[in-house]
Image (cartoon, rainbow, N blue to C red):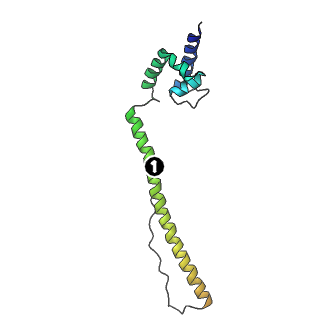
Amino acid sequence: MTIFTKTEQVLRDAMERLLSGRPQHTDGKLTKNNLCREAGVSRVTMHRAAKILTEWDARTATSSAGGTPAQHAAALVEFFRKPCRSREGSRALQEQVDATATVIMTLLSENRSLRSGQVSNGARAVVPMPRHDVPHA
């Protein structure tokens, strides 16, 4: 058995492990980088095995893990929308916190004034602030 056929066999074994979801040396993503790492060969050595790479491309294109470019694009759009929703929710919560802090400071000030006898009866009334519902993220 020549070195090249040993390399092909190592790459083919690594390909089978990755495609079957049983990686030993990588995170299991179906990338060429993971293929060479799983096989324990350099990228240069892997690229010399053109026959194996052609087989890899064909099998990952039809693999359910491979997906289509449209599926990948949709997943990316959703991925980037999540932080936007999170920021919107965060802003709404920050507005509530600010409003609550203002009410608390007003109440503390009025409480101090009442304890020291500085406010006559009915001189100032505490007006509750309207409640803003927090959107659920």
Q: Which residue corresponds to the image point at 44% horizontal and 46% vertical from the top-left?
A: 80
- Which secondary structure, mark 1? helix
Q: Residue furthest front?
A: 44
Query: In the figure, is residue 13 to the left or right of 53?
Result: right
Q: Which residue corresponds to the image point at 45% horizontal and 29% vertical from the top-left?
A: 66
Coordinates of residue 96 in the picture (x, y in percent):
49, 67
Q: Quadrant of residue 8?
A: top right
Q: Nearer the viewer, residue 66 or 10?
A: 10
Count numbered badges in the picture.
Answer: 1
Q: Quadrant of residue 25?
A: top right
Q: Residue furthest top?
A: 1
Coordinates of residue 19 in the picture (x, y in percent):
52, 24
Q: Nearer the viewer, residue 36 or 134?
A: 36
Q: Which residue corresponds to the image point at 45% horizontal and 49% vertical from the top-left?
A: 82
Q: Quadrant of the N terminus?
A: top right
Local packing at callout 1 (Cα closer than 10 Å; few below 14, some 14-19, many 20+) is: few
Mark 1 highlights which residue? 82
Coordinates of residue 120 in the picture (x, y in percent):
54, 93
Q: Is residue 137 something one can see in this rendering? A: no
Q: Nearer the viewer, residue 134 or 42?
A: 42
Coordinates of residue 137 in the picture (x, y in percent):
47, 54
Of the residues shown, which amino acid type is indicated by label 1? Lys
Query: In the figure, is residue 61 to the left or right of 41?
Result: left
Query: In the figure, is residue 68 to the left or right of 90?
Result: left
Q: Residue furthest left?
A: 70
